[in-house]
Amino acid sequence: MSTLARRARAEWGPLSRAVRDGLAAHRWRAAPMTVAAVGLTALFQYVQNQPWGYQFVQNIGSVRAEDPLWLALLRTPLSLFVPALDLPVWGALAQILLVFGIAEICLGWWRTLAVGYAATLAGTLYARVGVALGPGHLLGLPASDARVIDTGPSAAVVGLAVYVCWRYRAYFTAALVTVLMAVEVIVKNNLAGKEHLAALAAVLVLCAFSAVRHRGGPTRSGSSDSGPGLGSGEKPPIQS
């Protein structure tokens, strides 16, 4: 086996086995939440492109920093499934299908949603803080960004990708995603890129908390995660 193949196997082996085992055990039922998320995103894309539907989608799922906090929090759950109007929807659907699907198989649907919403909420709250700090601050944003709609599903996708990679020890891939998001901000200095970094920061805090929580904890012999995607002898590197 070549050096490159060995490194790829070490990087993605545990994750690929978890996905393969989950699909083998559950088949099309392995990721029902992901299928629903793809369908909901496609529905929102169709509705918001209709003359009668644009304002409706804005009212229930679009979040801006200028919105009252209570309204932004109320809209945040659906904002995760509202794709950006200026980007091709097939890209958002492919990202959700791939990243949400892998995460749901490996983590379970509720943990996937929790991490995705934490990442989305971190980006949304950062926009409010950044606008309040102003452009003169290192982490500040111009006042015009208060009227920009948040990132939609992309912050959740980025956060979930890094979380799953960390959990299954694909550290190089997690680092690569983080570097690419930093390069995005440098090349295209917009609100979406900065919200992606805020989402990554929130996920890294979750990873650190989980690592500290389980450091030195006892391991029960024969125990295994009950979530999908784990074979009888397969355990994730860190169990929650």
Image (spheres, rainbow, N blue to C red):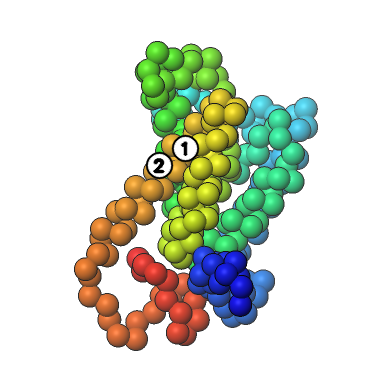
Q: Which residue is mark 2?
A: 201
Question: Which residue sits at x=59%, y=29%?
Answer: 187
**Relative to residue 120, is residue 57 drawn left or right?**
right
Q: Amino acid at mark 2?
A: Ala
In this rendering, is residue 205 above or below 50? Answer: below
Image quadrant occupied by the C terminus: bottom left
Circle 2 SS class = helix
Question: Which residue sits at x=30%, y=85%?
Answer: 221
**Relative to residue 221, is residue 158 drawn left or right?**
right
In this rendering, is residue 97 above or below 73? Answer: below
Circle 1 SS class = helix
Camera sees residue 213: yes
How far from the left and from the top, in percent, is residue 15? 53, 68
Image quadrant occupied by the N terminus: bottom right
- Residue 62 placement: quadrant: top right
Mark identifier at residue 197: 1
**Relative to residue 114, is residue 86 drawn left or right?**
right
Residues marked 1 and 2 touching at CB (< 8 Å): yes
